[in-house]
Image (cartoon, rainbow, N blue to C red):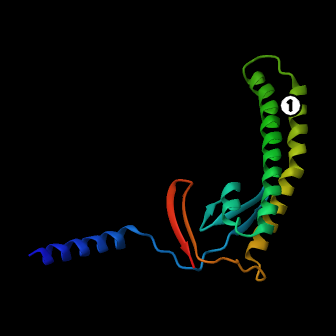
Amino acid sequence: MSIHKNAVKVIAIICFIFFTIELFSQEQEKIIIVKKPLGTVFQLNGKNLKVNEIADITSSNSVSQKEMKIAKRNYRAMSFFSMVGGTLIGFPIGTQIGGGEPKWELAAVGAGLVIIGIPFQIGYSKHTKKAINEFYSNNYIPLRQNQLQFALKYNSIYFNYNF
């Protein structure tokens, strides 16, 4: 009878493992670059990627990693100038709507800051495209040996074994 109980336990464990582990093939989908009128969007499997997600994906290539470092710096500068500029533009508009006396000089300064952010946006797109193209270039072959990874990323925990 104990052999039967052990067999049931083994089958239960195998079924548990089979139904709870996600299996991925070695072939991964590529990041798609989508050009839009107001900027460039980077997508993977139909999902827009954030800067840190692109950096994580391309981190195994040293050239891509350097390009993404520059891209992230441009992204932070662009975000700063755009947010501060947008706030300075919106403040006088809100004052006008509220019935107060707006200071349009603030809006002019805000517009200038938004314009200053445009070259940083262009630099971000340019360096991110370079990083992605280098990562997927035919000349790049990852020099990996057996690699075991266990990590927390975004909203999940994953275990990865590359061979």
Pick out the residue farthest to the bottom.
138
State the residue at coordinates (85%, 41%): 114
Q: If the image is split into quadrants, where does the C terminus sit?
A: bottom right
State the residue at coordinates (86%, 51%): 120
Q: Which percent across, then down, holds residue 2?
A: 12, 74
Query: Which residue occupies the foreground of this view, 71 or 5?
Result: 5
State the residue at coordinates (90%, 44%): 116
Relative to 81, is 37 above or below?
A: below
| Residue 50 visible (yes or no) | no
Q: Which percent across, then down, holds residue 42?
A: 70, 63
- Which class describes the residues within 10 Å of circle 1: few (<14), some (14-19), or many (20+)? many
In this rendering, position of residue 113 left or right of residue 161: right
Q: Tell me the amino acid under the disc marked 1.
A: Ala
Query: Which residue occupies the foreground of this view, 26 or 35?
Result: 26
Query: Which residue occupies the foreground of this view, 147 or 16?
Result: 147
Relative to 75, is 82 above or below?
A: above
State the residue at coordinates (76%, 79%): 140
Q: Give the quadrant of residue 112.
A: top right
| Residue 52 visible (yes or no) | yes
Residue placed under numbered mark 1 in the picture: 107
Q: Which percent across, then down, holds residue 1?
A: 8, 76
In this rendering, position of residue 27 left or right of residue 121: left
Q: Secondary structure at mark 1?
A: helix
Q: Give the quadrant of residue 98.
A: top right
